[in-house]
Amino acid sequence: MGKKNKKPSAGESPTLGPQQPTAESSTASSTTNKKKTTPPAPQSSTSPSALVICRNKHWRYISSFHGPWLQLPLEVLETLANANYYMPLPRPVDPAVFYDLVKIRQLVDGATDLAVRAANGVASSTLSNNLAGGGHHMQAIGLGFGHNVGAKLSPERRFRMREQATQKLSRAYHLDEIASSVATMQSTSTLENVAGLVLQRAANDPDANYVHFFHEKIPSRQLAECTDFEALNLIIGQRPSDCEPLRTRAIVRMFKEDFEGAVQDLSTALGVCRLQQPRHKPSAEETMQLEQKGRRRRDNPPLDERDQPSSSEVQLLFQRAGCYLTLACDHVPLALPASPVEQNGRFPKPANGASNDTLNGDSVSKEAEGEAEDKGPTKQQLEMRKAVRLYAKRALRDYMEYFKHFHYSPNLPVDVSDDFSRQVNQATHRNKRYYNQSRHSSQRPDSPPESSAGHTVYELASLFASTPPADLPPYPSTDLVAMGTAAMEPVQTTTEVVTYHPLLTDALHSLLLCHTLIQTSAKELQRHAHMVARLARLADGYPIFQASRSPARADWIEVLRRAENWIELTSSWEALCAPAPLPAPMSGNGLSAATASINALSVTGGATPAEIEEMRKERMRQQAIIEALEDERVNDEASFKAAILARQRRAEADLANSTNGGVSSPNAGPKRWAVDDGREYPILTERAEAVARWIREAPAGSGAGSSKRKKKSRAPKKTAEPDGAEATDGTQASRPEET
């Protein structure tokens, strides 16, 4: 995320506790006076040929929700969602997200049918299809001939159909606006105008206003300038018990760089959400899973919609944690002495042939640093250092709450994971025997009943506790085994598994950035980094999500580079996070790793892993173009070309390092499902630069000066109590929903 609008001025103490939000505060407050919002009208003065696209195409993390779920038949998607739900913990995919995708597909498909029929003026979808295909449309209604069966519908009937389509789309956006944006992009363009047509007759319709907010056409990359809060304020006033419009308004505030206002909206939304549903705890169905994971289940009854888990709280926690992390990074420049680079407004010229990579503050003269140390930190800098740690602690708290919704097992039986792959293969091939398959063991009569029982399950949050579980397999091991040699190992009976969520990888790396700003000890941060790498290499969106890029992971990689691996990792981050090899082939009726890969290919229709050098280079170039288009920092042709070139060079360098360093090539063996051969964002972001500078320049212990720590040996203990108390007070102030 970029810098926020508000920067505490010199001598001004930051507001550490968010205020209670009100509907009237939706317009730009005093914290965002530097950026005035403008009506959502295209600004033709900036560019006469500016690209105009729907507002929802600007939403962040859209690439995280791409995958086969958009193309799979709806009945297959429902079958897979039920199969995923009835798997023992940890489930392959978060069931709340999985069921949301099913409902979003149902709603978007239904809305598409209604919108197309209203546009064509026909009553039934069958007749609409026949008319579009030039078939015998009279036979669709049982008549052999006639000329009046294709008569246009009345305007009132067409309006009612569009109104129903808008209601379906509104419900989809309420479930998950990112996933719904991806689904509507894949649908017909008729959906883009359906809400606007409804608003022509019902200007205050909340569903139409909510859908039109996402579908309204605005100039590309100008969301902040071309979006106001009028429509969202109207919806929030009409439906105060809905947390979703507050979530949407918070995301718009992030685009406008008003992160404090976004925190207020998200905190209010969390309060509304938690009033409507109990707080997260082991539910009855999860308890049933743990009690019956050793039994055989012969049927998978479809789960009623009212019993399906909700993902609203997870979405709100992730978004609010990101706001807190951005606020922490935005306070870093004010918490540290100004470098000559900042004072002069330009970077110094490199000396002794130094590369341009050192021009982000690394070449500050030692004399200037010595003078800054002699002067000591100012009062404002001490306040800002305290703010950095406080916001980072709040972000860490929300990320830990986010992790409590997902699970990890160090020893899940291989036949259980293969059983899910078998069901995916059967469902995609329309095998009706799927409903009679055993859920937790193979169908062999001699299969041991204990093979699917007795595995350990942990919440992800417990893995980052001060004392982690003791029965985890060592990682990284003394020697990283290449994928190509995995088949030569003894047959594995258990495997590590983590529940997949589209935003999990980004949250894991954001957690490391939080610990860095809190100034966690290097030894403990190394332990957390190894745990993140362990989980990131296991994250697998099979069979509905494809691999996506993570901005937080890219920032963490840049921080490691610019801080010179201060936590002393034994391998590069790319090597530590290399996808874990699939389990070794099993005997009997068990699935082999190659079979699982073939099943994955049967879902996506992808090509074989073999790839010649020319194809690899072309794929790297296409990937670089796609990433550059999605990069918000690219705003003209020059920066676009520079971004593509930088990404291509980084990809080639990383590929060369991987080949020379002995890391197995992608062709060495079967891959996991969500393996992304593309590289991360190579351009240094403001967040990565702020964290790297904090590592280099911030003194140990944020709030106090070094002289005070030297005079009093127990000063850290005394200062820790107010800091912790302050964090507690801030937590209570920022989370009124918990009271």
Image (tube, grey):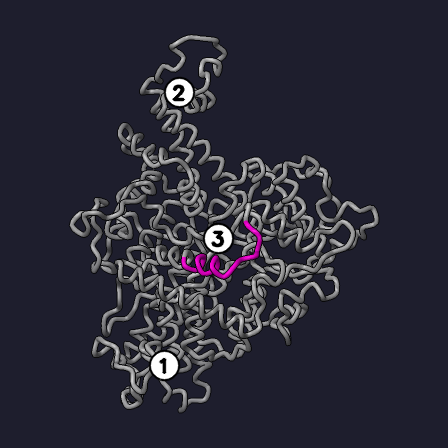
Q: Secondary structure at mark 3?
A: helix
Query: Which residue matches tag 1?
Result: 697
User: Left or right: where does residue 41 sit relative to residue 723?
Assistant: left
* Precedes in sequence: disc 1 or disc 2: 2
Can you tell which quarter of the image residue 662 is in? bottom right
Label 3, label 1: how far apart the Cα atoms are? 35 Å
What amino acid type is highlighted by mark number 3? Val
Crowdedness near tag 3: few (<14), some (14–19) or many (≥20) residues, C-alpha within 10 Å: many
Q: Does the magenta-highlighted stretch encompass residue 700?
A: no
Which residue is most to the left? 45
What amino acid type is highlighted by mark number 2? Val
What amino acid type is highlighted by mark number 1? Glu
The quadrant of the image that shows the N terminus is bottom left
Residue bounds of the magenta highlight: 607-621
Image: 309 above or below 731: above
Q: Which residue lies at the image location 52% right of the left edge and 50% below the top edge?
A: 545
Q: Position of residue 98 (x, y in %)?
A: 54, 45
Image: 653 above or below 713: above
* Precedes in sequence: disc 3 or disc 1: 3
